[in-house]
Amino acid sequence: MSNKILAFVESKDGKFKNSAFEVVSEAKKLSGELGCEFEVLTIGSGVDAEAENLGSYGATKVLVVDLNDLNAKSKFPGTQYSHSAFAKVVAETGSQKGANIILISGTGLGKEIAPRVAIKTDSAFCQDCVALHVDSGNIVATKPVYAGKSMIDMKFNGDKILITLRPNVFKPTKSGDAKAAIEKVDVGSLNITDKDFSSAVKEVVVSSEKLDVAEADIIVSGGRGLRGPENFHLVETLAGVLGAATGASRAVVDAGWRGHGEQVGQTGKTVSPSLYIAVGISGAIQHLAGMSSSKCIVAINKDKDAPIFQIADYGMVGDAFEILPALTDEFKKVLGS
Amino acid sequence: MKIIVGVSLVPDSTTKVKIGADKKTIDEAGVSYILNPYDEFAVEEALQLKEKNGGEVIAISFGTDKAKEAIKKAFQMGAEKGVLIKSATADFDTYTAAKNLADYIKGQSPDLVLFGKTSIDFDGLSVPAMVAEMIDYPCINVVVKLDINGNEITAEREIEGGKEIVVSTLPAVIGTQKGINNPRYPNLKSIMASKSKPVEEVAPTYNGNKYEVTEMKLPPAKSAGKIFTNGAADVPELVKLLREEAKVI
């Protein structure tokens, strides 16, 4: 059979995140390698103008499902969106359009709906893919396992395939300024019943105005070397100057110095920012697993034998209490802030 | 309340991974195995719900004989019953695991199914939702707070930069995230009691993987970095390199 790709991208308040551009770019690239068509799907209200702009990443057609129309089918009052209903929309649109390959961004939402779509469409499934290539006409997906301590290459049995792409790994590639055509998909055509709303999100609580480590391009993380929660202002100040998110090691989260939302590592978040600055973190294997794919790693630690130095691009052996303020001042100077 | 908790046995998170001779799996020599850390939250949540509402907690696992260790750990924490869906091979994928678990769970008609949000080995974050989809239950994963009132569920689910308040109804599948509770340590009495509890073995219902691993490899090695030892005096040089060499600022 001939292949066809459907790329599902998330929109929020009429806008797309970077991860959407990454998925569209990768779908474009993959469609070229497989010599097949691809279409983009999004669910949102008032999203058309931004959806047209996905054309600059190579999309020719964007299917738009209206979120309000979809939510009108929910049995839960006050539904903002529903993972189960989103999964139904993606699976149903995919099969109506004859798409056998579905790409989804591995955001919190994407990872929640993808396993359901895999079952609904009876697809082979790779969650959290970090590289894709085509080998003799077959897709090969690379995925980190054992928290990034090793990688596997996966080949899929059958021709139905669903892959989520880890955010911030694939390159968004602008290929011009063409506008994509918008095709409205009527919710009534998708066979949605209230059973498809098996759960619903009623409220989204933003924990703070702070940038989340999972989405940040720069992260400044602190560990036990900071000696106590009262010293984390040094990390926060540097992060503030760099527009970075603050992260933490498991040791300081377990000690209650910082919240779990900041934890980077095997039982926290896996991150791959452009720049990761580890302050007073020795580099336990669980921590390294969560951040070793960062593009540039700076380690500051007073112990020259700390394992973090083995993966650091730049290491500073010394006193964090002396180096951090100096680093903050220097960045202020060069960034003119 | 009939609660089923899915548990799995995984290499300890401190394991240094070595690639096995087949170049597709890890070398198991010297690897110690533990109950998947996220499953501890699932077992704890099940026990707390049982203590509050009555009922029973059944720990199940899909895997080879070795997976019994995960069930025994659940016994030590306080699960009453344990079932191993015994796979003849360790070569199974996420779909096969989910399908076998789903087939067993469906026959039990539990009120609630709990899993850890993901297992730390293959980290697919997918078994809870796959099982739920197969047995036609709602699913909420990455849950940090769970309230059950009659048949109504309100859960807090962790997302980037915040959380979602999700509503649903029983019966349901819930995946637990760190923060939902503090898993108990088994005491001597529960450890002794667990020793006499049998693990029931049932035959798998499905085999037929949807993907195959063609190669396992270590992540690309990093070349040695530049090390500075003069403290704050080296900071201007570091910042210069970050801007001009690494080009990340």
Image: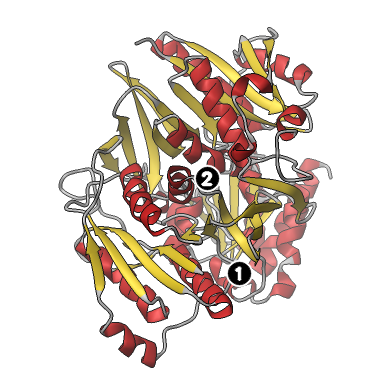
Q: Residue B130's image quarter?
A: top left
Q: Position of residue A272 (x, y in %)?
A: 54, 44
State the residue at coordinates (31%, 35%).
B210
Tell me which amino acid carries mark 1.
Val
Q: CA distance from mark 2 to mark 1?
A: 21 Å
In the rendered image, which quarter contains the N terminus of chain A? top left
What element does badge 2 sit on?
A: loop
Disc marking residue A205: none
State the residue at coordinates (39%, 59%).
B108
Q: Position of residue A228 (x, y in %)?
A: 67, 76
Disc marking residue A253: 1
In the rendered image, which quarter contains the C terminus of chain A? top right
Tell me which amino acid carries mark 2.
Ser
Q: Is residue A56 above or below residue A284?
A: above
Q: Is residue A86 above or below residue A189?
A: below
Q: Residue B84's image quarter?
A: bottom left
Q: Position of residue A164 (x, y in %)?
A: 49, 35
Q: Position of residue A112 (x, y in %)?
A: 55, 43
Disc marking residue A294: 2
The reply to whether residue B46 is in sight is: yes
